[in-house]
Image (cartoon, rainbow, N blue to C red):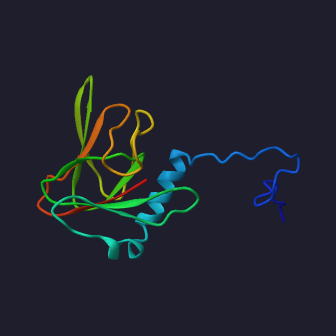
Amino acid sequence: MVPDLTMRGQEDPHGRTIIARPPTVGQLAARVNDLAARPETWWPLATFGAAPVTVPLEEAEGIRVWLTTWPPGRRDEVNCQVSTLVAGELGEVVITPDGVSERPLRANRVRVHGGGAPTGGAHPGGAHASGARAFTNPGPAYAITLHS
């Protein structure tokens, strides 16, 4: 048996202040990927409307995750560090001072959005530090994404 040297759940024996650190991008990606693999936890919460609908999901270890449904033909800005497409089709459009780029999101692949930390709130609708980031649904059906 290997001893637990991390002393989880215990205060620092040297009297130092323990600083809570924000989750890493890797932890966010792992959380979104884990949740995407368990659709029974989020599928009943999916709501389909004329505008994108955002539904907060469970929060664990300081990691907030939410689900967004995207109606056909809609485009809206997003503010997240990682996302994954679980149903339908979406494109990601990024507008920076250097120009516009558009890439399709691939289903069941976690996308890490680089270019700095997001600004604004933790949910879709804010601008991104490297430029405006939007998802667009070019397909004939709804799309569903998970974000953190």
Image mark count: 0
Q: Residue at x 23, y 52 (%)?
A: 90
Q: Residue at x 26, y 70 (%)?
A: 47
Residue 110 appears anywhere in the view:
no
Q: Nearer the viewer, residue 114 or 21?
A: 21
Q: Residue at x 14, y 58 (%)?
A: 72
The image position of residue 63, as x and y in percent, is 52, 56
For this orientation, the residue located farthest to the top is 98
Report the side of 86 relative to 32 (left or right): left
Residue 47 appears anywhere in the view:
yes
* Quadrant hosting residue 95: top left
94 vs 74: above or below = above
Task: For the N terminus, give its image quadrant.
Answer: bottom right
The image position of residue 39, as x and y in percent, is 38, 72
Report the side of 136 relative to 79 (left or right): left
Q: Residue at x 42, y 45 (%)?
A: 81
50 vs 13: above or below = below
The image position of residue 94, as x and y in percent, is 27, 36
Q: Nearer the viewer, residue 121 or 135?
A: 121
